[in-house]
Image: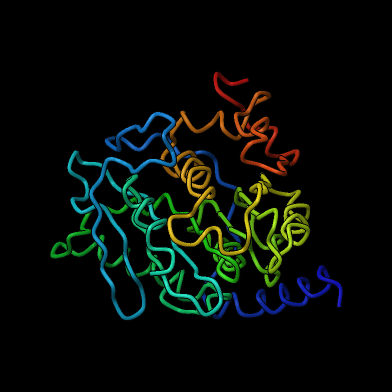
Amino acid sequence: MPGRTWRRLFGGLLLAVLPVLGMTPAATAEPAAATGGIPSVGTAWGEPGPYEVDVDIEAVHTFYHPRTMGPSGERHPVVIWGNGTGAVPGIYSSLLRHWASHGFIVAAANTPASNFAISMRAGIDVLERRNADPGSEYHGKVDLERIGSAGHSQGGAAAVNAAVDARVDTAVPIQPGPLTDPDLTRVPVFYLAGQRDLTVWPALVKALYRDSGHLPAVYGEVRGAGHLSSIGDGGDFRAPTTAWLRFWLMGDENARGVFFGPGCGACGDGGLWSGWERNARATQIPGPGGV
């Protein structure tokens, strides 16, 4: 069965279950205004951020978060995470800790089968309750207006599926599987492939990217990367994903020029990328200085 036809069938199934899950298609996000109080890291996206990190392993989710949340009155954006098939958050722990060190609260679903993004989205529900609970360390510290979805392999497809939820503002599918349909969402998406990925071929990821003409989409193919290159600390996927999340969820203007504008930093970085594309909607987003 052709991949696009299979995705259409899956998309129809997903649409059928959306009302049951309480999901509605998200609207296209605008870059968030700067999140006051979260320190700048300049352009050191791949280096640890300014926050010490704690990890809370629970029954349904593992939470990675700044050890001291909101020390300057800031609220922390959220990233919901989906694992690859048969995997658990611990396999990606160094990457998820890295994002938490930059000021994100990461709610990683413990499920090894994340495709429908049900557990991922439940992480938002948990954080909504804790943010409202005066007895919780999260109380008043969670920025529920700035939420991204991310994941690897099956979890990469789930990152797009999770973005059907109107609370999600952007998606970062890393080497995503095919069981998703970009037509169901409207948020900016950063599709990541590995040049030497023999499990999820770059052509499959590019097909999802090319099916995303209705939303701002960027395609990056990491030179030399195989399917497992993103586990652990994220490898060469770590810095660009951090920059993307900081731009869309923190309003970090230092990251704008990596992706947007006529001279975007990643566009000519042949050392990292074996493939790089931006669609028409992405090229309409201004670069630094409004260019």
Q: Residue at x 53, y 47 (%)?
A: 236
* Lateral position of residue 175 relative to residue 141, left or right: right
Q: Residue at x 41, y 40 (%)?
A: 250
Q: Residue at x 66, y 55 (%)?
A: 193
Q: Residue furthest right?
A: 2
- The foreground one among 246 and 182 is 246
State which quadrant residue 278 falls in: top right
Q: Residue furthest front?
A: 224
Q: Position of residue 153 (x, y in %)?
A: 60, 67
State which quadrant residue 281 falls in: top right
Q: Position of residue 263 (x, y in %)?
A: 65, 23
Q: Position of residue 169 (x, y in %)?
A: 51, 51
- The foreground one among 196 and 281 is 196
Q: Residue at x 68, y 24 (%)?
A: 262
**Quick check: can you spot residue 178?**
yes
**Quick check: can you spot residue 217?**
no
Q: Position of residue 167 (x, y in %)?
A: 48, 58
Colour basis? rainbow
Where the N terminus falls, by quadrant? bottom right
State which quadrant residue 125 falls in: bottom left
* Lateral position of residue 92 relative to residue 153, left or right: left
